[in-house]
Amino acid sequence: MLRAPRGLAGAAFLKLAFAARTMAGEPTVLLPELRSLLASGRARLIDVRSREEAAAGTIPGALNIPVSVLETALRMEPAAFKALYSTEKPKLEDENLIFFCQKGRRGFQATQLARGLGYKGARNYEGAYSEWFQKEG
């Protein structure tokens, strides 16, 4: 079994492992593309952080659906989704359904979940809210 080193070396190892995992199959979006998609109105953003985290700040226009309830939300009938979230439910064929969290892990998890449910345009904003806040906030 491969073990990650501790300390800064361990953090670097985990960051590389995460990067390799995202490059190895899960579609991602980087900040320049996200800016363009948002400016053109072609992105549907879902903040999968907790309600408390999202209330403290989020990317403008994002819908907050915590990762803990995301599967239930994505399996809802469209009318029930709209009643609960006051917006249309994403369609399976929607392009640029972009998930994000604080650092990237929950966004990655949400993207995997959505793609597993058939949302072909699901992607993870790799920089997550921490990058957005640092560069755009």
Image (cartoon, grey):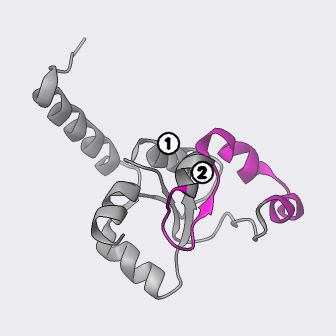
Residue positioned 14% across, 24% down in the render: 7
Which residue bears the numbered disc 1?
109
Disc 1 packing (10 Å; few <14; some 14–19; many ≥20): some
Disc 2 packing (10 Å; few <14; some 14–19; many ≥20): many
Most extreme residue toward the front is 56
Precedes in sequence: disc 1 or disc 2:
1
Quarter of the picture holding the N terminus: top left
Q: Amino acid at mark 1?
A: Gln
Residue positioned 48% across, 67% down in the render: 59
The magenta-colored residue range is: 56-84
Q: Amino acid at mark 2?
A: Ala
Quarter of the picture holding the C terminus: bottom left
Q: Is residue 21 above or below residue 79?
A: above
Residue 6: horizontal and vertical position, in percent? 16, 20
Find the distance from the CA under tag 1 to the CA under tag 2. 9 Å
Q: On the picture, is 60 further left or further right than 81?
A: left
Q: Is residue 73 magenta?
A: yes
Residue 97 is drawn in which quadrant?
Answer: bottom right
Residue positioned 41% across, 50% down in the render: 26
Which residue bears the numbered disc 2?
114
Residue positioned 83% across, 63% down in the render: 78
Q: Is residue 60 above or below residue 81?
A: below
134 or 30: nearer the viewer: 134
